[in-house]
Image (tube, rainbow, N blue to C red):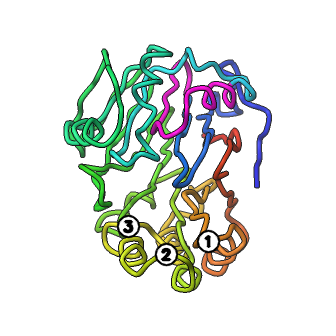
Amino acid sequence: MVFNEGLATNTKYHSSGVRPVIVIPLQSGSSGNCIYVESGDTAVLLDAGVAGVHVQRRLDARGCDIRGVRAVVVSHDHMDHASHAGVLHRKCGIPVYCTMATIARMREKMEVGRIGDLQLFSAGTTLAIGSLLIDTIPTPHDGADGVAFIVRAEGLRLGILTDLGHVFPGLSERIAALDAVIIESNYDPDLLARGPYPPWLQARIKGPGGHLSNEESAGILSAANRTRLQWACLAHLSENNNRPDLAETAHRALLGSELRLFIADRYGACGPFEVVA
């Protein structure tokens, strides 16, 4: 499920005269998460759960240069989102942005190493990085001071909404104002119940600090402004408790066939996708 395989470059404009926002999910799931977002002369990585060599190769394959990335912004301290932040900084010279609680927990749990350019922010604030504004949205996920993101550029809004915990107040209103969204659709309830996970882990996943099910993701997307939302990409699918066909079926049942719907790759990149004015 991929569109616009030819990457729009910084010199490409659409009929509105506004450059598109380029989005490349480089990997998504409990094995690692990292999303490349580019607008104009600014590119960032959202999360750092993928080894730098894979990030570089996957960007190279799509005509992007990791040396142009201005920031790695870490959403929370779980290893699948944070474990390679230090290496990306040291190997590529990319500043790392995260909250104080997140970096403290990262240093407790994993070998982060030296980070010479660490930019701390408070959850709920807006980051200004080049031509991008990144709203950090506090989430009830069971990480340390975790956030989701809304990236604003060229008058467009892109949501990066994974590891949400549960459908919390204000989420529907934020989705209604988006032009495109990457949203978690982590598990199918029946597969989770019949799967190999012990009861305590099942309870964690479907509890208030866990993840959204296919049906919960579809339900929250139904609040979107259908005339504004250009596409949705389902992300963070569980390897054991979900399947792409189940996720798509659950969403189509509520959303119909008009919305462009994609599914992020668990072990590789997909896209690039464009958000256009």
Neighbourhood count class around disc 3 (C-alpha, 10 Å): few under 14, some 14–19, many 20 upward: many
The residue lying at 30 percent from left, 15 percent from top is: 116
Q: Are marks 3 and 1 in contact (CB under 8 Å)?
A: no
Q: Amino acid at mark 2?
A: Tyr
Comparing 244 with 200, the one in front is: 200
Identify the residue at horizontal 32%, vertical 20% (top origin): 115
Count the labels in the image.
3
Which span is picked out in magenta? 39-59
71, above or below 220, in the image = above
Label 3: which residue? 210
247 relative to 130, above or below? below
Q: Residue, x 75% and y 28% (percent of image)?
A: 61
For disc 2, the marked residue is 197
Is residue 144 or residue 10 the one in the foreground? 144
Amino acid tagged 3 = Gly
- Residue drawn at (61%, 55%), measured in percent from left and top? 233
| Label 3 – label 2 distance at C-alpha | 14 Å
Report the Cα–Cα distance between label 3 and label 1: 15 Å
- Identify the image quadrant of residue 119: top left
Residue 49: say if magenta.
Answer: yes
Mark 3 secondary-structure assignment: loop
